[in-house]
Image (cartoon, rainbow, N blue to C red):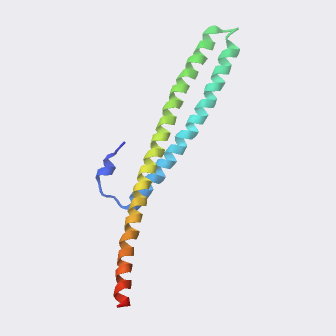
Amino acid sequence: MFSEKDLVARSTEDMAQEVEELLKDSKRLREEYEASTKKEAEMRRESVDTRPSDAERAESFWQEAEKLREEAKEMMQLSMEKKLRAAEVQHRIDIHDQIESLDNSDEIWSKAVKASR
């Protein structure tokens, strides 16, 4: 699940912005998934209610519900992929921050050792 962005050196600010965008997209897709799932349930109920009087119309409701179900599945999968990608990028930011703190601590220790002599 690498992207072209992984092959280019980027600042932590750029990566943080990517995390924010990915999480926002993930949330939007999750909300669309939930709305689609509710609409699917409504379509299935309508299909069941309509079946005795108009079987053809009921079948079209059912087919539309199936289509919504597939779209909802794809939205949820994409939402999870974006959330995982955001976690990967955030992990890289965390590692970068840890390395920077280690670099600073080495400098501080060396100054402290020199100062005590």
The image quarter containing residue 68 is top right
Please state the horizontal and vertical placement of residue 99, each as a whole percent of the image: 37, 65
| Closer to us: 67 or 105 | 105
Q: In this view, does 103 lie to the left or right of 27?
A: left
Q: Quadrant of the N terminus?
A: top left
| Closer to us: 71 or 86 | 86
Q: Quadrant of the C terminus?
A: bottom left
What residue appears at the point 58 percent right and 22 percent down from the top-left corner? 65
Q: Is residue 9 left or right of residue 39?
A: left
Kindly give the residue lying farthest to the front in the view shown. Answer: 117
Whether residue 12 is situated above or below residue 87 in the rendered picture: below
Q: In this view, does 102 lie to the left or right of 7?
A: right
Please state the horizontal and vertical placement of residue 83, each as a whole percent of the image: 48, 45
What residue appears at the point 38 percent right and 69 percent down from the top-left corner? 102
Please state the horizontal and vertical placement of residue 28, each as a whole percent of the image: 54, 43
Q: In this view, does 61 lie to the left or right of 111?
A: right
The image quarter containing residue 15 is bottom left
Please state the horizontal and vertical placement of residue 30, each as a whole percent of the image: 55, 40
The image quarter containing residue 81 is top left
